[in-house]
């Protein structure tokens, strides 16, 4: 037997480790900066911010508790490093009484909902609680006792801005409304959205976080009375977009709007109302002898973040693309709950923007078809309390924060500097 093949194999075997040793080590895969930023969102911090907002009760517009909440929000934003806070002021007239909206003609599947939706299936009660005695907590009842005075007086929104490093003249607006109603704590409507925006301001203001485009974090007032805070912003600022001031300074007080993203009621997706049962398992009946419907007590397994745009808006095509970009960001970066896209955005602060710029809203449910059908029993009620929600509920809000943070980071070219 010839020794040549064996010698060749031995030579090759000895040479192989040497060749491997001489190869350059594989380059380390750079860590995804968006994944790093999303990882900085923490459930306990999100909950703590909501809890902080509840110290001001329902934050009804035009009251001292509303003004104190604005001061607290601004102080928090500054403490995060988003120090260029500003107030946008406007006048609002509180009427002696409000005129209810006219009912809409029913559609094939059920009553007509807001935003072009249909109220399919079983429905729970909806409405605004205006009875202080419906709040059993005496401390909270006293905190919410100051009414909004009839007449015209000053209101304010508060915001801060992450200035873009290379395109400071372009901007995404990330918003939520800080006012509430109902004699509760407005923990979900809209403490959950306000805390989300504040948490994003905190993350994007951290040292080493750089975005190519600007991001404005806005907390609106007067959403509950008809979107007057957002409407005032649009009316006062839309014609200032993209104007450098002073000329040659590289400063843009109102960068050109690229998109507006609203967050309004982020936590409660327990599903369609079902018959309410008593201790004996029998249906509960109302005063008219009809079954009472209420959502299940636990967050449903198929809960999701609802991303909505309005199909009738002038900017609907761009808004749809923006919504699907957020859906894709959710697929890649959200940890627990998926997202769904709908086209009936309505009754929230993105509405005044929707004919001027792609505008979307993120919610716990579809605003017209589901929230409008009583899917959230705490909506505008004295039970909208921090204590009414479980960690599963808070986690849905955090997943909406993950979704928006990831999408905005992608859209603004956000990077981490060493």
Image (cartoon, helix red, strand yellow):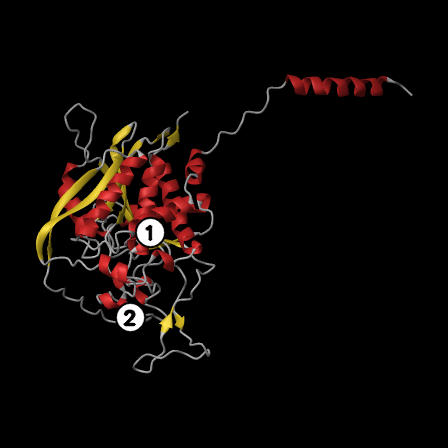
Q: Is 378 drawn above or below residue 349 in the view shown?
A: below
Q: Is 285 drawn above or below residue 403 in the view shown?
A: below
Residue at 30% from the left image edge and 82% from the top image edge: 288
Q: Earlier in the sequence, mark 2 or mark 1?
A: 2
Residue at 85% from the left image edge and 17% from the top image edge: 4
Q: Nearer the viewer, mark 2 or mark 1?
A: 1
The part of the image, by quadrant, that contains residue 415 is: top left
Residue 269 in view, yes or no = yes
* Label 1 crowd bin: few (<14), some (14–19), many (20+), radius 10 Å: many
Tag 2 secondary structure? loop
* Label 2 crowd bin: few (<14), some (14–19), many (20+), radius 10 Å: some
Q: Which residue is mark 2?
A: 111
Q: Quadrant of the N terminus?
A: top right
**Number of residue marks:** 2
Image coordinates of residue 221 in percent, x first then y, are 20, 50
Say whether residue 404 is left or right of residue 170: right
- The residue positioned farthest toward the bottom in the image shown: 289
Image coordinates of residue 133 in percent, x first then y, are 24, 68
Tag 1 secondary structure? helix
Q: Is 405 drawn above or below residue 166 in the view shown?
A: below
Q: Quadrant of the C terminus?
A: top left
Say the numbered circle drawn on residue 96: none
Closer to the camera in the image, 142 or 186: 142
The part of the image, by quadrant, that contains residue 27 is: top right
Say the numbered circle drawn on residue 192: 1
Closer to the camera in the image, 323 or 261: 261
Residue at 37% from the left image edge and 41% from the top image edge: 405
Say whether residue 11 is left or right of residue 142: right
Residue at 84% from the left image edge and 20% from the top image edge: 6
């Amino acid at each position: 037997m010839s020794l040549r093949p064996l010698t060749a194999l031995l030579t090759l075997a000895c040479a192989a480790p040497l060749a491997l040793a001489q190869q350059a080590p594989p380059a380390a895969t750079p860590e995804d900066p968006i994944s790093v930023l999303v990882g900085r969102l923490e459930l306990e911090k999100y909950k703590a911010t909501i809890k902080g907002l509840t110290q001001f009760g329902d934050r009804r517009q035009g009251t001292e508790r509303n003004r104190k909440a604005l001061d607290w929000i601004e102080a928090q934003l500054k403490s995060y490093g988003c120090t260029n806070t500003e107030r946008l002021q406007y006048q609002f007239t509180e009427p002696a009484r409000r005129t209810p909206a006219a009912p809409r003609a029913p559609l094939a599947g059920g009553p007509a909902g807001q935003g072009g939706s249909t109220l399919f299936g079983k429905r729970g009660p909806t409405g605004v609680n205006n009875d202080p005695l419906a709040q059993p907590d005496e401390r909270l009842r006293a905190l919410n006792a100051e009414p909004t005075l009839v007449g015209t007086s000053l209101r304010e929104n508060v915001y801060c801005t992450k200035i873009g490093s290379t395109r400071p003249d372009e901007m995404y607006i990330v918003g939520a409304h800080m006012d509430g109603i109902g004699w509760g704590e407005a923990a979900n409507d809209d403490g959950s959205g306000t805390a989300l925006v504040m948490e994003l301001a905190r993350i994007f203001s951290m040292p080493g976080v750089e975005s190519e485009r600007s991001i404005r974090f806005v907390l609106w007032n007067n959403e509950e009375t008809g979107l007057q805070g957002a409407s005032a912003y649009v009316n006062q600022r839309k014609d200032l977009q993209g104007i450098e001031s002073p000329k040659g300074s590289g400063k843009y007080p109102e960068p050109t709007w690229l998109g507006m993203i609203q967050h309004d009621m982020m936590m409660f997706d327990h599903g369609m109302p079902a018959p309410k049962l008593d201790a004996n398992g029998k249906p509960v009946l109302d005063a008219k002898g009809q079954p009472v419907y209420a959502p299940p007590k636990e967050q449903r397994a198929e809960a999701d973040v609802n991303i909505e745009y309005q199909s009738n808006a002038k900017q609907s095509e761009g808004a749809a693309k923006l919504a699907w970009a957020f859906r894709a960001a959710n697929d890649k970066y959200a940890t627990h709950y998926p997202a769904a896209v709908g086209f009936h955005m309505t009754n929230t602060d993105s509405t005044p923007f929707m004919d001027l710029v792609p505008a979307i809203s993120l919610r716990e449910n579809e605003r017209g078809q589901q929230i409008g059908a009583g899917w959230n029993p705490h909506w505008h009620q004295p039970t909208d309390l921090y204590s009414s929600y479980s960690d599963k509920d808070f986690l849905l809000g955090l997943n909406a924060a993950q979704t928006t943070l990831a999408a905005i980071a992608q859209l603004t070219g956000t990077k981490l500097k060493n």
